[in-house]
Amino acid sequence: MLIILAIISDSHLHTPMYFFLSNLSFIDTCFTSTTVPKMLLNIQKGITTIAFENCLIQMYFFILFAQLDNSFLTVMAYDRFVAICYPLYYTVIMNTRFCGLLLLTSWLLNVLFSLLECIMVLRLSFCTELEMPHFFCELNQVIRRACSDTFLNDLVMYFIVGLLDVIPFTGILFSYYKIISSILRISTTEGKYKAFSTCGSHLSVVTLFYGTGLGVYLSSATTKNSRANSIASVMYTVVTPMLNPFIYSLKNKDIKQVLKKLRNIIYIKRYFQVYKSTQSSNTRRS
């Protein structure tokens, strides 16, 4: 939320890169909010149950924000690709209208496909009470515990994964292939470092996001240990979104400068508030 405030408050950060970064920060906040509050409440009160309706709602928003995270990482990779490979056409290609169109398309596609996956769960029947060795309602875990035929659900799930996960990830790989090729053609070391520094934070976040995500699903496919799967899921759903703001703030000079300005403004306001309170108290005493 501090990153969003910093980008909104400083006009120098009103660029496509920071526009998408503010949206990614908002999505990360929502992403963790779908699982962490309920998990902490369950730990505190010792609750191990959730209503089926609440499970569906949690599952919908988890899928939505996870896929949106993926979409915006892809859009940001394209933004860096244009900035490094076609710098002279950057302002023409990444104009306000096109950025708004990318934002709207990402939201519409993910809202519709997330809703489709949750609607497909409603057609399933469950023999007994649904028990999952997990700390949140995950689509794959729910489908596994259905008693009815899940072929259509699996088909829809794999289609959406291919459309919203595999294709964007391929786009990110292609973008960085072109970016690295362009950087290697730069003659000076200083120029190479400057060009790579503009996408270093994004590359770190992409590696962390896809690395932990693949780790979750590979571990769930190779082992039946529910504890190991839950630990891997915590890395994917809690640790990664938590680290994203630190990566962007620590590696980005512009964000650090604006955050320092905000900190100084807060300190100055606090100083004047303390000063006014002391003056008013002295006046009353006199």
Image (spheres, rainbow, N blue to C red):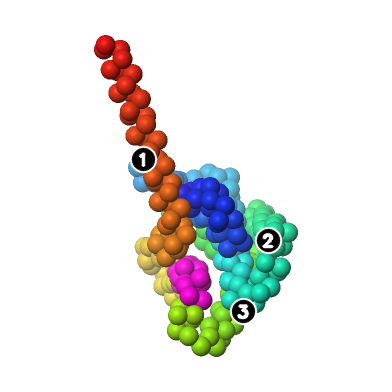
**Secondary structure beneath label 2:** helix
User: Residue 24 at what x, y percent from top left?
Assistant: 55, 58
Would you place residue 277 above or below residue 51 in this image?
Answer: above
Instruction: Residue 247: tell me if it is visible.
Output: no
Q: Which residue is mark 3?
A: 85
- Look at the image and give the residue range highlighted in magenta: 194-211
- Contact, CB < 8 Å: mark 3 with mark 2? no
**Secondary structure beneath label 1:** helix
Taking the image as shown, residue 34 lies to the left or right of residue 163, namely left
Q: Is 204 inside the magenta-drawn segment? A: yes
Q: Image quadrant of residue 16?
A: bottom right
What residue is at 47 percent from the left and 60 percent from the top? 254
What residue is at 65 percent from the left and 64 percent from the top? 153
User: Dot 3, how many residues are within 10 Å of its Cα: few (below 14), some (14-19), or many (20+)?
Assistant: some
Q: Nearer the viewer, mark 3 or mark 2?
A: 3
Q: Which residue is mark 2?
A: 99
Taking the image as shown, residue 82 lies to the left or right of residue 193, namely right
Q: Which residue is mark 1?
A: 267
Main SS category, magenta section: helix
What residue is at 51 percent from the left and 47 percent from the top? 5
Comparing 41 with 2, the one in front is: 2
- Give the amino acid at mark 2: Cys
- Quadrant position of the C terminus in the picture: top left
- Contact, CB < 8 Å: mark 2 with mark 1? no
